[in-house]
Amino acid sequence: MQPFDSLIDRRIIRKNSSTFYAAFRHLPAAKADAVFAVYAFCRFADDAVDNGTGELPQIREELLRFERGEIPNRPFWRRLAVAFRRFPMRLEPFFLMLEGQESDADFRQPATLNALLRYCYLVASSVGLMLLPILSDGVSQELEEAAVDLGIGMQITNILRDVGEDYRIGRIYLPEDIMRQYGYTQRDLSNGSVNPAFIALWESLARLAEEHYDRFLAKVPLFAADSQQLVSLAGLYYRKILDAVRANNYDVFTRRAFVSAREKVKLRFSAPVRKESL
C-alpha cells in the first residue's frame, strides 16, 4: 500500500498536469514517489504566485529549514525528505525555482530573448536539475545540459500555448525585442490578432524550443535504463503541443491546444526504450 502522503502527491499531479503524470507514473515506485514529491513542491510554489496567497516567503523559509535538517509540516516536505534519503539530490535547484517564482510575483515582460531564457532556466530547467539524481545513475555535465534543454523547451512551449491566457492575467512572456523584430504590437496582442507577424514570431520561438528538444532527445540514452522511455515521453508529449497549436491555426487566444490520449499512446509506442527498462 502506498503511503497516504504519496497518494496526495499523485493526486496533485493528475489534477494539475496530466501530461507530466502520464510521462512519469510508470517509473518504479520509489522513483515515481520522489518525482511527484518534487512536482508537488513546484506546484505549491507556482500556485502561491498564481493565486496571490503571498506564501512565497514562507516557502523559502521552509526550504531553509529543510536545508538545516528540519521537515516542515506539509506532505510534500515529508515525501521530499524520503527522496533526499534515497537519492543524491541537491537543494540548489529548489532555490533556483523559488527565484523564478519570485520574478513572476513581481512580473515584468522580458525585454530580451536572453531574459526569457533565464526565466525558463529558473522555473523549468531547475525542475529537471531537481529530478536528475532520481532519473540517472550518476549526474554528469551532459545530463545537466539535457535537463536544462528539456526545461527550456517545455517552458517556451507553455508560453506559446498560453499567450492568450497569460495576457488575460496581465502577463506577456513574449520578449519585447522579439515582438519588435517581427512587428507584432501590444495592440495586436490585446486584440488577439493571429496575423502573419504573430505566426512568424510564434514559429521563431517554437523552432527554438524544438532545437532544445532535439538536443535533449539526443542525450536520452545517458539516463538510467528504467527512466529513458519516460523522460523521452516528457519531451515528446510537450513537443507535440506545438503541433497542436499549429493544427489550431495558431489560435492561442480562444482555443487551448492539448495532446489527445490517442496521440499520447502513439508517442508511447514510438519512444525509444532499452529492453532492460521494460
Image (cartoon, rainbow, N blue to C red):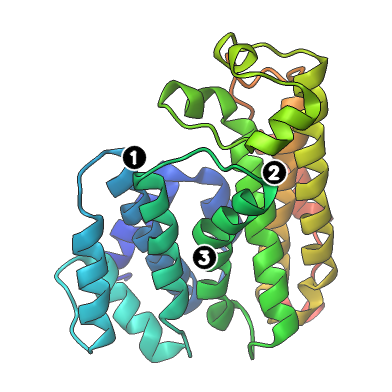
Answer left or right for 103 relative to 147: left
Q: Residue, x 20% and y 48% (percent of image)?
A: 54
- The three-letter amino acid code for the residue at tag 3 is Val
CA gap, disc 3 and disc 1:
18 Å
Residue to which mark 2 is pinned:
264
Q: Earlier in the sequence, mark 1 or mark 2?
A: 1
- The three-letter amino acid code for the residue at tag 2 is Lys
Depth-wise, is mark 3 or mark 2 nearer the camera? 3
Foreground: 258 or 180? 180
Q: Residues within 10 Å of mark 3 (few under 14, many from 20)?
A: many
Q: Quadrant of residue 189?
A: top right
Q: Is residue 194 above or below residue 201?
A: above
Q: Residue furthest left?
A: 73
Q: Would you say the residues marked 3 and 1 are in contact, meaning their CB atoms lie under 8 Å apart?
A: no
Depth-wise, is mark 1 or mark 2 nearer the camera? 1
Looking at the rendered structure, the secondary structure element under dot 2 is helix
Q: Residue furthest top?
A: 191
Answer left or right for 262 relative to 11: right
Q: Earlier in the sequence, mark 3 or mark 2?
A: 3
CA gap, disc 1 and disc 2:
28 Å
Looking at the rendered structure, the secondary structure element under dot 1 is helix
Q: Residue, x 41% and y 62% (percent of image)?
A: 99
Disc ID at residue 50: 1
Answer left or right for 11 relative to 264: left
Q: Residue, x 33% and y 55% (percent of image)?
A: 45
Q: Earlier in the sequence, mark 3 or mark 1?
A: 1
Q: Residue, x 46% and y 40% (percent of image)?
A: 108
Foreground: 238 or 164? 164
Disc ID at residue 127: 3
Viewer can see residue 58: yes
Residue 142 in the image: x percent, y percent?
Answer: 75, 81
